[in-house]
Amino acid sequence: MMSPRTITSTIITTILISSLLNSVWAVESTLTIQPSIADTFVNSMYLSHKYPEEPHGYLWGMFAGNMYAEYDSFKGYGSSRIYIQFNISSIPRDAKILSANMCLYMYDPPKTSQEFEAHRVLSEWNEHKLTWTTQPTYVQTPTSTVTVNPTPRECWVCWDITKDLQMWHSGEARNFGTMIKISQERNATDQVASFYPKEALQAQHLKPKITVRIDWYKPIPQQQTETPSIPTKTPESKPSTKEAKPTFSPTYTPTNITEHKPPDYTILTLASVTIIIVGAILIAKGKFRKDRKKVNGKRRRQTSPR
């Protein structure tokens, strides 16, 4: 029978092994998912327009915020919302998500600082059919809120969607994407931010993306687009306001990616774990033998004639 000291040593050894296993197996990696598989916007101004709203899924720009428009004898205010969805199947099922940021590249900011919210969408939608009157339901409480300023004019705007991505990844909630809206929707002008969608003619690295930090048992080969140090924009690079069919499908897969292959630590990890386990067993076995000798010695002294 093992003595209390041996049992305590075994428990401590087991705890140490568990801690070492966690540190050995958990490898932090950063995964970039780009571009989105669906993105579009809707606008409330068409509610008072003589023509119904047409879906905007083919446009080369998308907008969120409050605006005032004058065209075709129409004058009126409206609020725009962005709907966007990503394919997250590249995240390993047994990985632990540490953080996730959804980022859109803004090419034209609001004239004054405004807050924009990210909301988790609760039902299906189609980028080529969606209008203001056919919007899906969404969680009323924003997942995160960011302040967008007039300067710099061109930059990435990112929302923390860690909680939502964790729910999608675990299966707790279905992935219907995210809705972006200004915090205060009202009749106002110049409170709109303009972003590049996946259909934009700009470089791949300026299209919507999610950056995810995960813990997994081995490093994940990073796949990301080439990113120049300073993005530039020419006057003709602004998205057209006319609808046009994209030159690729919504499930377009980038081809100009650079894959970084880190070394495979699987063999080294298995060897380390094996050494730790064998060492722990030998230590426990040695202590057990030592304790047994002590017990046998006491028994001999007790049974020996005086």
Image (spheres, grey):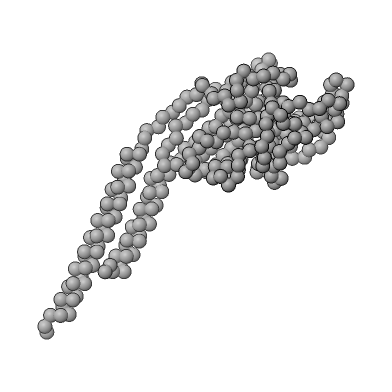
Q: What residue occupies the far top of the structure in this picture?
A: 236
Left or right: where does residue 298 sit relative to residue 40?
Answer: left
* Residue 189 shows in the view: no
| 239 relative to 163, above or below | above
Residue 9: horizontal and vertical position, in percent? 32, 62
Q: Please report the residue visible at 55 percent of the width from the left and 36 percent of the height from the top.
A: 88
Q: What residue occupies the far left of the structure in this picture?
A: 305
| 38 relative to 18, above or below | above
Q: Please report the residue visible at 77 percent of the width from the left and 40 percent of the height from the top.
A: 184
Left or right: where does residue 112 sit relative to residue 271?
Answer: right
Q: What residue occupies the far right of the structure in this picture?
A: 73
| 294 relative to 233, above or below | below
Say which quarter of the image contains residue 261: top left
Instruction: Quadrant for the C terminus, please.
Output: bottom left
Residue 152: horizontal and vertical position, in percent? 67, 28
Q: What residue occupies the far bottom of the structure in this picture?
A: 306
Left or right: where does residue 91 sit relative to residue 147?
Answer: left
The mark tally for this picture is 0
Say which quarter of the image contains residue 174: top right
Left or right: where does residue 301 sit relative to residue 138?
Answer: left
Q: Please report the residue visible at 73 percent of the width from the left and 36 percent of the height from the top.
A: 135
Say which quarter of the image contains residue 122: top right
- Comparing 186 with 85, the one in front is 85
Instruction: Quadrant for the N terminus, please.
Output: bottom left
Residue 250: horizontal and vertical position, in percent? 61, 25
- Comparing 163 with 152, the one in front is 163
* Residue 265 shows in the view: yes
Residue 95: horizontal and vertical position, in percent? 48, 42
